[in-house]
Image (tube, grey):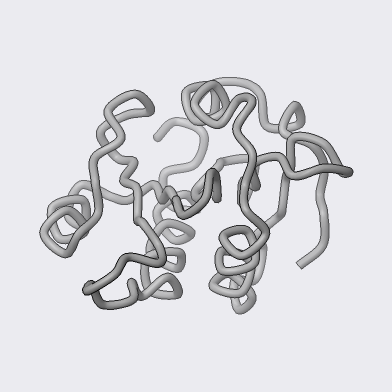
């Protein structure tokens, strides 16, 4: 996956809340790498970062719609359809009301907790972004 641009390229509409949330956050390199690996098989996923040099948050988008991000020491955020938000919450994700009802946070590297299926959640977020578009 190649770098498509900085976060400013995603400004506007449905992306503003997630960009405000990740704002000045950084992303640990292992968290960013886990998200990028999970998205490798997605056909039209673009990688955006706060600054091409540095450790800013990483945001994935398709068709100009942000659908996942990596931030902090262990957080992956994904934007899911309403039918999957409940499932994600029931399996250990946390709601992200500051971004919106369709965003949840998945915490990596939790002791005594199964590893989350990032490929599954990233793929579901990608499909949701492609089907809802900028009007999500």
The foreground one among 28 and 135 is 28
Count of marks overlaid on the render: 0
Vertical placement of 56 versus 41: above or below? above
Q: Taking the image as drawn, is residue 61 in sight?
A: no
The foreground one among 73 and 65 is 73
Q: Position of residue 99 (x, y in %)?
A: 38, 28
The foreground one among 69 and 56 is 56
Q: Position of residue 97 (x, y in %)?
A: 27, 28
Q: Quadrant of residue 92?
A: bottom left
Q: Taking the image as drawn, is residue 89 in sight?
A: yes
Left or right of 60? Residue 75 is left
Q: Quadrant of residue 132?
A: top left
Tell which residue pokes out farthest to the front in this image. Answer: 111
Q: Locate the C terminus and report the quarter of the image it occupies.
A: top left
Q: Position of residue 30 (x, y in %)?
A: 61, 65
Vertical placement of 16 versus 66: above or below? above
Q: Residue at left 82%, top 62%?
A: 2
Q: Residue at left 49%, top 30%?
A: 18
Q: Residue at left 23%, top 72%?
A: 113
Q: Position of residue 116 (x, y in %)?
A: 33, 72
Q: Locate the N terminus and report the quarter of the image it occupies.
A: bottom right
The foreground one among 14 and 22 is 22
Left or right of 19? Residue 48 is right
Left or right of 59? Residue 97 is left
């Amino acid at each position: 996956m190649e770098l498509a641009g900085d976060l400013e390229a995603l400004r506007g509409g449905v992306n503003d809340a997630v960009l405000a949330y990740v704002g000045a956050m950084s992303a640990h390199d292992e968290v960013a790498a886990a998200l990028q690996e999970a998205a490798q098989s997605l056909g039209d996923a673009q990688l955006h970062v706060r600054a091409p040099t540095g450790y800013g948050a990483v945001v994935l988008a398709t068709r100009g719609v942000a659908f996942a991000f990596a931030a902090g020491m262990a957080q992956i955020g994904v934007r899911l359809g309403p039918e999957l938000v409940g499932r994600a919450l029931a399996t250990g994700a946390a709601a992200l009301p500051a971004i919106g009802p369709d965003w949840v946070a998945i915490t990596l590297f939790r002791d005594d907790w199964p590893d989350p299926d990032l490929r599954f959640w990233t793929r579901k977020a990608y499909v949701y972004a492609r089907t809802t578009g900028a009007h999500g």
